[in-house]
Image: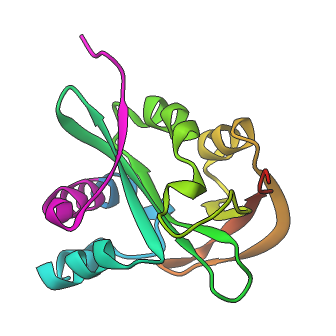
Amino acid sequence: MSEGIEVVEATVDDWARVKDVRLRALADAPEVFARRLEDERERAPSEWRARLENPDAATFLAVADGATVGMAGVFVAADDDTLRNSSRCGLPRSSGEAGREGRSVKPSSIGHAPRDLPVELWVTETSLPARSLYEGLGFSASGEEQPLPSDPRLNVVQMVRSGSG
C-alpha cells in the first residue's frame, strides 16, 4: 500500500528517470504535450543531463513506493521574472495523486529564486481533468490560446497563478 507520493528535486544523476517518465507519459497521452515522442526518444543523454544542470530551471519527480510516477519542470523567464511550467506529467495510475502533491512544489525551490513568483502553464483545451486540477491549485485561464506545437489541430490554453509575496 502506498504511503503517498514524495516530491523530490531531480539532479543530473536522475536523467534516466526523467527520460523514462517523460517517454512513458508521451506514449500514453501524446495529445497533451508540445513535443513529440519520436523527438524525445532521439534526445542524447547529454541533452537530458543539460536540462537538469540548468541553473534557471528545476525538475521535480513524484515518487511512490520507490517508483517515479510523475514529474514537473519549471524555469524562470528572464524577460519578466515569471516561473513557467515547462512540463508536467503523471503516469495514468497516479496522475491525480501526483497533481495533488504538486501543491508542495514551490517556485522558491529553485535555488536562486528569492521569493514566490507568478506561475504560468499551458494545458490542452480538451483536457478538462487537468484544467480542473490546476484550477484547484489556484490557476485561472488568462484568455490566451495557441495551437499545440505537436498537433496544431488542438489548442492549448494558458493558465496563470499569481505569486504570493
Q: Which residue appears farthest toward the right when viewing the image?
A: 143
The answer to whether residue 121 is above or below residue 146 is above
Q: Is residue 77 left or right of residue 48?
A: right
Taking the spot 68% from the left edge, 59% from the top edge, the residue there is 115
| Span shown in magenta | 1-24
Give how far across and how far down residue 39 sits, in percent.
Answer: 27, 82
Viewer-side residue, 9 vs 122: 9
Q: Is residue 126 magenta?
A: no
Give how far across and how far down residue 158 sits, in percent.
Answer: 73, 66
Taking the spot 36% from the left edge, 21% from the top edge, the residue there is 4
Taking the spot 16% from the left edge, 84% from the top edge, the residue there is 46
The answer to whether residue 77 is above or below residue 141 is below
Asked if residue 11 can be seen in this view, the reply is yes
Give how far across and how far down residue 27 sits, in percent.
Answer: 28, 58
Viewer-side residue, 108 vs 144: 108
Q: How many numbered circles are shown?
A: 0
Quarter of the image where the N terminus is located: top left
Q: Is residue 19 magenta?
A: yes
Q: Is residue 49 left or right of residue 116?
A: left
Quarter of the image where the C terminus is located: bottom right
